[in-house]
Each structure stands twice: as structure tokens, then as C-alpha cells.
Image (cartoon, rainbow, N blue to C red):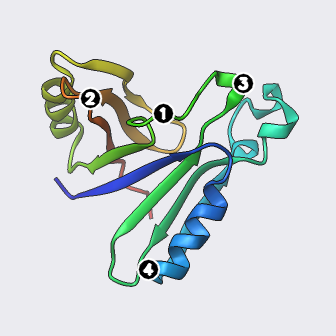
Amino acid sequence: MQAMTTYFNFMGNTEEAMNFYKTVFGGEITSLSRFSDTPGSEKMPANERSKIMHMSLTTKSGAVLMGTDFLESMEQKLVLGNNIHLVINTDSEQELEQLFETLSTDGKVEMPVNKTFWGAYFGMCEDRFGIKWMLNYNYPQNS
């Protein structure tokens, strides 16, 4: 396992929250993608296209905080427990599959493991204790 990080879900104010955390913890915003940057975004409601699909803050201590906006059009609602995921970055697809299978046993698969448009092998699940997990393996980039 390479690293574990925290992933927050917000109801439309991810950018504001992450910029606040930047003032608290220092560091730099290392990535920012809007839903308008994703394939198929033209089918989304216009007012949701500018919302944050993914944003990362690397703090001055090296911790990484990530976040996204929930979308009303997808009937996503914030409730205690679904506003945070723990993210595991793995060293291989095989490690990801083993961890995903174990964590999701007697739990719930939220997004089956699959290759993504952003160049990763990724899946989401909730374990039997109600903890939400994102598992990610980034494919090596061609230099």
C-alpha cells in the first residue's frame, strides 16, 4: 500500500472548503477538475457543470486532502457518514482487488472495480461497519 488519504464530499462548496483548509494547514492545491472537464458533461444540468469533480490539497506537512461536490441531479444527499471516504492508493491492480474484496465482504459495493477515464484502476465500497473506502491504483504514465 502506497498511502492512505481522506476524501471529503460536499454539497456544492468543495472549492470554498478546500481553500479554507489551505489557509488552516498551508500547502498547495495540486489538482482541480470540474464536472465540465469530464466525458458526457454536456448531458449534465448547466448549473452543475462548474461544480468540483475532484480537488486535492497537499498540505505543507505532506498530508493530502481530497474532495468533490455531491450532485443534486444524481440525488446525492449529505448525511452523517457519507461525507468522508478513506482512500487507499495501492501498488498494483492485484493488491487493489484483494483489499477491495476483503473490505466489501458483508458490506456494499458502491462502484465496482474498473479502469477509469482518468487513468486508474478504481473502486468504491462500504465495509460492514459503515466505513466508506475508495481504492485506487494509478497506472504508470508513459514518459
Query: In this view of the protein, which residue sits in the foreground, 79 or 99?
Result: 79
> Could you say whether the residue bearing mark 4 is in a helix, strand or loop?
helix
Label 3 and label 4: CA atoms lie apart by: 33 Å
> Could you say whether the residue bearing mark 2 is in a helix, strand or loop?
loop
Mark 3 vs mark 1: which is more N-terminal?
Answer: 3
Location of residue 93 in the rendering, given as x and y in whole percent from the top left corner: 24, 37
Label ID, residue 73: 3
Q: For the residues labelled 3 and 4, say whether their Cβ atoms are less than 8 Å apart.
A: no
Label 3 and label 1: CA atoms lie apart by: 17 Å
Say which residue label 4 marks.
25
For marks 1 and 2, give the one nearer the viewer.
1
Look at label 3 and name its amino acid: Ser
Look at label 1 and name its amino acid: Val
Q: Give the residue drawn at x 19%, y 28%.
A: 129
Mark 1 vs mark 2: which is more N-terminal?
Answer: 1
Say which residue label 1 marks.
79
Q: Give the residue drawn at x 20%, y 51%.
A: 91
Location of residue 2 in the rendering, given as x and y in whole percent from the top left corner: 21, 58
Q: For the residues labelled 3 and 1, say whether their Cβ atoms are less than 8 Å apart.
A: no
